[in-house]
Image (tube, rainbow, N blue to C red):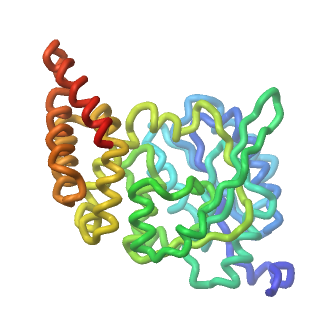
């Protein structure tokens, strides 16, 4: 296997490290320095900020004044009004001139060999359009990093074809390795970038777009990213305010024909709904929930009894009379027994 050491600079593709920031002032210097400390040399740095209210942009400007010469090219994008994560990512990707895109949040860290490891793999697997690897999550306690075990895509997922991976992804069975994604700029252009309808979810809808267009996910067995866990993680916010389930409702509508296309996806749809319907009821309105329940019922993978009880539970959920509370309690107990 030919090492990158043997390649001339002119032979190495330009890689765009795109750092996505929003109120990242507390962590951004560590992220920036991790981009600077890459062992790979042909890198441009794009920083895209989504109207931070803290000192993120000022910190980035000051850092770039001292370190811009470490990159082939740098650009800092800032706007005056927050537009959401997918739009922020799209601004960075569309500005990037590299053949390959490495997106990273402004609180995470690239390991020094991140880019070289990805390019090494791509060099020997030129058909690859999107590549994942392993990540290590960490928390900081009393100034010390505490690491969890590496997370990577399991072989059981990697052995599936694109259609089968779609089924796993849409029902939340893909491991959380988004920060490791290494993506061809051309793939973004073919698939029309991230969907900006989903303000807090850039990855999940894009992965579905990839697999439904026949792009199968692959991974290398190397750790390339350190993922910081803290109370302001976007993932925490998504769970807390129900955005995840509101977005899932929209996505299920978009892909309903594919979900109903085979027995495996219909079974998975019913299973996912039964495991999560209380969250849908909590975070989405009554008409949306009844529509979702009817679509699940069409798969013939839930019993008539479950359908009846869930339908009644959804109908009385918004009401606050004594009778409604009593019925909710009854339906809830029976649904739990059927789950």
Can you tell which quarter of the image residue 144 is in? top right
Question: Which part of the image, by quadrant, shows the C terminus?
Answer: top left
Which residue is painted at 19% across and 59% down in the image? 300
Q: Is residue 122 left or right of residue 8?
A: left
Can you tell which quarter of the image residue 278 is in? top left
Q: Is residue 160 visible?
A: yes
> Between 328 and 144, which is closer to the camera in this rendering?
328
> Between 40 and 49, which is closer to the camera in this rendering?
40
Q: Is residue 69 visible?
A: no
Q: Residue 215, position in %: x, y?
A: 46, 75
> Between 205 and 20, which is closer to the camera in this rendering?
205
Which residue is painted at 43% across and 58% down in the image? 194
Above or below — where is 316 with respect to 295?
A: above
Above or below — where is 251 with respect to 262?
A: above
Q: Residue 181, position in %: x, y?
A: 60, 62
Q: Is residue 293 left or right of residue 16?
A: left
Above or below — where is 318 with respect to 117?
A: above
Question: Which part of the image, by quadrant, shows the N terminus?
Answer: bottom right
Q: Residue furthest bottom?
A: 1
Which residue is painted at 21% across and 60% down in the image? 299
Q: Residue furthest right?
A: 5
Q: Residue furthest front?
A: 337
Q: Residue 93, position in %: x, y?
A: 53, 61
Which residue is painted at 79% across and 49% down in the image? 33
Q: Residue 166, position in %: x, y?
A: 41, 66
Q: How many marks?
A: 0
Above or below — where is 6 with respect to 148?
A: below
> Between 319 and 2, which is closer to the camera in this rendering?
319
């Amino acid at each position: 296997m030919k090492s990158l050491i043997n390649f001339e600079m002119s032979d190495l593709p330009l890689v765009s490290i795109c750092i996505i920031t929003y109120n990242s002032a507390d962590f951004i210097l560590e992220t920036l320095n991790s981009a600077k400390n890459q062992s790979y040399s042909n890198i441009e740095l794009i920083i895209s900020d989504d109207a931070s209210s803290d000192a993120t942009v000022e910190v980035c400007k000051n850092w770039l004044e001292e370190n811009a010469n470490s990159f082939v090219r740098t650009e800092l994008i800032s706007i005056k009004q927050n537009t959401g994560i997918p739009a922020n990512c799209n601004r960075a990707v569309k500005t990037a001139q590299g053949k390959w895109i490495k997106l990273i949040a402004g609180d995470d860290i690239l390991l020094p060999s991140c880019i070289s490891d990805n390019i090494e793999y791509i060099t020997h697997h030129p058909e690859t359009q999107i590549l994942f690897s392993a990540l290590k999550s960490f928390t900081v306690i009393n100034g010390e990093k505490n690491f969890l075990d590496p997370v990577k895509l399991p072989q059981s997922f990697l052995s599936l074809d694109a259609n089968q991976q779609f089924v796993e992804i849409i029902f939340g069975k893909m491991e959380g390795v988004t920060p490791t994604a290494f993506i061809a700029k051309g793939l973004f252009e073919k698939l029309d970038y991230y969907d900006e309808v989903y303000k807090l979810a850039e990855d999940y809808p894009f992965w579905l777009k990839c697999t439904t267009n026949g792009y199968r996910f692959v991974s290398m067995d190397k750790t390339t990213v350190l993922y910081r866990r803290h109370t302001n993680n976007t993932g925490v916010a998504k769970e807390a305010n129900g955005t995840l389930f509101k977005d899932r409702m929209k996505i299920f509508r978009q892909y309903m024909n594919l979900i109903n296309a085979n027995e495996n996806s219909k079974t998975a749809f019913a299973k996912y709904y039964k495991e999560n319907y209380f969250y849908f009821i909590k975070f989405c309105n009554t008409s949306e929930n009844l529509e979702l329940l009817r679509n699940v019922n069409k798969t013939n993978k839930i019993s008539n009894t479950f359908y009846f009880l869930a339908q009644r539970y959804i109908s009385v959920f918004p009401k606050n009379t004594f009778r409604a509370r009593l019925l909710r309690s009854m339906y809830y107990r029976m649904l739990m027994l059927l789950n």
